[in-house]
Image: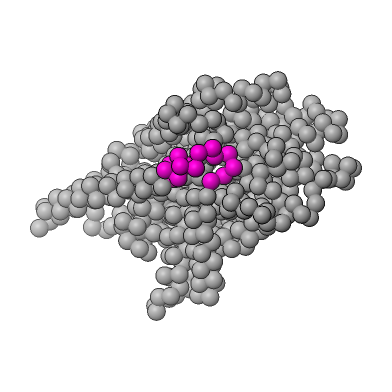
Amino acid sequence: MASEVTAATPPAIASQEAPHLKRVLGRWDLVLLFVVAVFNLNVVPSIAANGGVTVWLWIISLLLFFWPQGIAVIELAHRYPGEGGVYLWAKEVFGDFHGFLSGWCYWTNNMMYVPTIMLYFVGVSVFVLGPAHATLADSKLFALTASVALLAILVVLNVVGLGVGKWINNVGALGTFIAGGLLIGLGVFVWLRFGTSVTPADFRVPANPRFVLNSFGVICFGLVGLELASVMGDEIENPQKTLPGAVAWGGVLSGALYIGTTLTLLVAVSKDQISVLQGIVQAASHMAGRVGIGWIIAPFAFLLSLSIAGIGSAWLGGSARIPFVAGLDSYMPEWLGRIHPKYATPYAALIVHATVSLVLVVINFSFAGAGVQETFQKLLSLAVVLQLIPFLYMFGALLKIALQKSFSRGRYRKGTLIAAGLSGLLTTSLGIALVFFPAQQITSLLSYEVWMFGGTLAFIGLAAFFFFVYGRRKAARKLAAAAPAL
């Protein structure tokens, strides 16, 4: 762990290898961070496009994945506090390689996910300019230019520090609350005044459930985020006291918002007409037009744009702590563990993260020939696989801890840990498997499967390469440090 220094470590080495990060995240900062990280409106249209059956998938996932996730985060953060989160937990329970692989997948998934956030920002922000400009979102040049601009702004703010960057997260969370609440309120008003065309048949499993299967993995992906604060464990004020309550509040608020907005989208827009990039604004525009307040769409899109920017900031800043810690452990280039001399932030890891995300967007636009919506869906699906791999380790760690003969209670009893571990492990495995079924926006099954299988194997292979190459350097450094003492 970055902040741990053994008693035998010389002071000069300690000051060099254990840079101090500032504790700037309070309880309500964490609650807002959880809301903006977990409740991602950008995945709702992609899920709602598969119809009312997805509401049942939300409920199942909340019970079998989200609740166990909260248990796991609180228990593991209590037992293994510090910077690194999923990286640190897997390392402590399963060993160095598994810790690195868990952290690597967590980081690289966000290389896919952050670009989807940028694309979603483009799809929504054009409505701030007025409905006449909505077609700009389908322009590859405009989408790429706007994505690069937002990415650059978020990197600069996070390099300046969480003391500044957290306000982007907080403003994003407030934008999420207001936009989500406004959308749900419009849905309730339209339903009470005009009724709805949605029938009980819309909530049944369709005759061809192929596209619905992909939704389950995306739903599990949409519910991750409670672990994000623990990745920044050394930057939380009094984490043992602050974290459990923040996890509970963030989880309840996010779950309620997800189900409410999905139902609203189904009531307002036919599932066949839902755009994965603009579905939320489409629903709001349709409902506002019916009640005669069409003017509200521009400010609604602005609030939603703030929300998306907050989501991007949270995941960019949080996941960049993984290569930062891995750099300190020498499993990745050590310069990734550098902190900014003025702002005390992992600036090198942040810049690398943003650069790789940008390259992936350019590759998909320039070489794959896919449209904006298909590019969004392909990046999202691969991100789901990489994101859920660390959760296999997280739930597996609960089971291993609970089944030890020398088990001692932390936050929860043994039975609770076993139930949460089994439920989370099975649900996560199912979510990974089902996301390999293509969503309805995919036009070529072959290219999709090549992208999914090839991308997954490539990223895992890179993890093994970095671990064993830079792992040898770590061993050599330890021998060199021990030589004078001998």
- x%, y% of residue 113? 50, 40
Q: Quadrant of the C terminus?
A: bottom left
Residue 3, given in percent of the width and then of the height, sits at 36, 51
Residue at image position (74%, 45%) is: 266
Q: Can I make out residue 80 in this image? A: yes
- In the rendering, at what x and y percent does residue 65 appear? 57, 60
Q: Indicate the colouring scheme.
A: one colour
Q: Is residue 391 above or below residue 40?
A: below
Residue pictured at 80% horizontal, 28% vertical: 294
Image vertical order of residue 222 relative to residue 417, above or below: above
Residue 406: name its quadrant.
bottom left
Residue at (28, 46) in percent of width and height? 466
Question: Could you say which is closer to the camera, residue 295 or residue 465?
Answer: 465
| Residues drawn in magenta | 438-452
| Image quadrant assignment for residue 45 | top right
Question: Quick check: can you spot residue 304?
Answer: no
- Residue 247 placement, left or right of 350: right
Residue at 19% over, 53% down: 475
State yes or no: residue 53 in magenta. Answer: no
- Whole-percent x, y for residue 77 in the image: 47, 59
- Res. 172 image quadrant: top right
